[in-house]
């Protein structure tokens, strides 16, 4: 039975996805659970797994295309199984989309030539599917050279195409091996797992290093150029979310300055005792926020239309800047975890966030967010609330300042924080009480024990 490969909705806010790469070629055998493609969602890069076994008979989208959620992008079926119905469905979807989208999917593989202009889409798809990827499919793509070629031989490699098993492709990607540099030992020159293992076992060849060209120094800086590039799926999602937040959500802001001397002393003492892991300032801030939220449950809340939800657990969002945007992995049950546990879990979440490898459940369901720009030498800023959360805490850098202590001017380590509050949920006095507890705990760390 034929299996659809569709652009799945991998996050609640995802409306479309970008096909980054096919992991298998047309004609490759796949098993249920094999990774067949990688896509860019509005939050992360994620793999699409085959929901059934067979052969990847058709790719209906090319790498780089942005495709609506639910759209058919490929078909897995038996080698001789008819896929005419699914090809007609793909043509109908493309026709409904109209314009450029319809032209892109008009042929079964998105590359229909002018020779097919007089055929309807369903007929072209059927012709290509019965050809099994051979000369008829090449003709449907408008490839004269391939159309004149003899029918495909089993396992033969098409010009410019590398045949490799899904496992071999995965191993090569993980090991940095160029598949084009290998000779496959499988049927028809197909690269298999054993070929990758052999390449890993052999010593790498050192490429000759060409001398760097000598160029005359430039007397003027490079000129900037106008350019327009498509926004990533993450940037599009950020744009939608911010419009939903800063407009409809009535923000107000509370700022205070915190003496960090005792907190930094505590951190230094803890790190002196830890051999394998160090506590970061952000870890300490997260722990303090979690403790303060347990004492002020009105802040650990969300607006839900005509009601307010007060959460029974503290799930802290951690704003992380990554290439192309921002994501907020969630530290779950932060109020029940110690500093060492928080530190280890945050390191793992941040690393996988930057690699765009978070699962959807790892960046959804936060109840309060902390955003720290102190490492960028930003002393103070205001952050936009991440709905439906009711507040977000913006943390600036810790700097040495002259302050009056016991009537004398001394240098102290100070840090400014600003909390953005949703006035539908939080009033000024309620927010100020939370900020006061947060400040008191950092200035007197023993307060966390009582």
Image: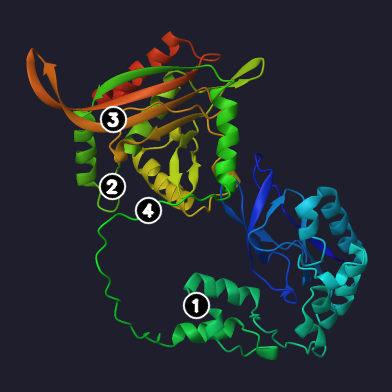
Q: Quadrant of residue 425?
A: top right
In this view of the protein, which residue sits in the foreground, 99 or 268?
99
Residue projecting furthest to the left? 408
3 or 4: mark nearer the eye: 4
Q: Quadrant of residue 242?
A: top right
Q: Rate crowding at label 3 as few (under 14), some (14 to 19) or many (20 or more) other CA atoms within 10 Å.
A: some
> Is 449 positioned to the left or the right of 138 in the image?
left
Q: Earlier in the sequence, mark 1 or mark 3?
A: 1
4 or 1: mark nearer the eye: 4
In this view of the protein, which residue sits in the foreground, 161 or 363?
161
Location of the C terminus by quadrant is top left
Which residue is tagged 1?
177
Which residue is tagged 2?
278
Which residue is tagged 3?
379
Q: CA distance from mark 3 to mark 4?
A: 32 Å
Q: Rate crowding at label 2 as few (under 14), some (14 to 19) or many (20 or more) other CA atoms within 10 Å.
A: some
Percent position of residue 142, x then y: 79, 75
Tags 3 and 4 touching, CB below 8 Å:
no
Q: CA distance from mark 4 to mark 1?
A: 37 Å
Percent position of residue 62, x then y: 69, 63
Tags 2 and 3 touching, CB below 8 Å:
no
Percent position of residue 407, x then y: 8, 12
2 or 3: mark nearer the eye: 3
Tags 2 and 4 touching, CB below 8 Å:
no
Which residue is tagged 4?
223
Disc 1 is placed on an element classified as: loop
């Amino acid at each position: 039975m034929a299996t659809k490969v569709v652009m799945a909705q991998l996050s609640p806010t995802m409306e479309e996805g970008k096909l980054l790469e096919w992991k298998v070629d047309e004609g490759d055998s796949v098993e249920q659970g094999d990774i067949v493609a990688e896509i860019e969602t509005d939050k992360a890069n994620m793999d699409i797994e085959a929901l059934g076994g067979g052969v990847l008979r058709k790719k209906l989208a090319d790498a780089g295309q942005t495709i609506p959620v639910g759209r058919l992008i490929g078909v897995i079926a038996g080698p001789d199984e008819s896929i005419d119905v699914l090809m007609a469905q793909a043509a109908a979807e493309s026709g409904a989309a109209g314009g450029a989208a319809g032209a892109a999917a008009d042929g079964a593989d998105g590359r229909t030539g002018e020779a097919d202009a007089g055929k309807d889409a369903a007929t072209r798809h059927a012709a290509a599917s019965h050809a099994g990827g051979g000369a008829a499919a090449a003709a449907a793509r408008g490839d004269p050279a391939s159309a004149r070629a003899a029918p495909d031989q089993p396992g033969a490699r098409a010009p410019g195409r590398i045949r490799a098993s899904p496992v071999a492709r995965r191993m090569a990607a993980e090991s940095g091996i160029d598949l084009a540099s290998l000779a496959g030992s499988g049927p028809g020159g197909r690269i298999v797992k054993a070929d990758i293992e052999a390449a890993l076992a052999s010593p790498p060849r050192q490429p000759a290093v060409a001398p760097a060209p000598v160029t005359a120094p430039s007397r003027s800086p490079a000129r900037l150029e106008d350019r327009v590039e498509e926004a990533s799926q993450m940037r599009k999602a950020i744009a939608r979310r911010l419009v939903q937040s800063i407009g409809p959500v009535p923000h107000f802001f509370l700022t205070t300055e915190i003496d960090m001397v005792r907190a930094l002393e505590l951190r230094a003492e803890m790190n002196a005792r830890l051999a394998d892991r160090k506590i970061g300032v952000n870890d300490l801030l997260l722990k303090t926020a979690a403790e303060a939220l347990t004492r002020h449950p009105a802040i650990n809340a969300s607006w839900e239309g005509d009601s307010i939800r007060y959460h029974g657990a503290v799930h802290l969002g951690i704003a992380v800047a990554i290439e192309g945007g921002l994501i907020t992995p969630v530290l779950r049950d932060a109020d029940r975890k110690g500093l060492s546990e928080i530190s280890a879990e945050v390191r793992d979440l941040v690393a996988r966030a930057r690699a765009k490898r978070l699962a959807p459940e790892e960046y959804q369901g936060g109840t309060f967010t902390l955003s720290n720009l102190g490492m960028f030498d930003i002393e103070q800023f205001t952050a936009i609330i991440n709905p439906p959360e009711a507040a977000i805490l913006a943390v600036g850098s810790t700097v040495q300042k002259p302050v009056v202590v016991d009537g004398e001017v001394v240098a102290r380590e100070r840090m400014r924080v600003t909390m953005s509050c949703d006035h539908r949920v939080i009033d000024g006095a309620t927010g100020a009480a939370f900020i006061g507890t947060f400040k008191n705990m950092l200035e007197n760390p023993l307060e966390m024990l009582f």
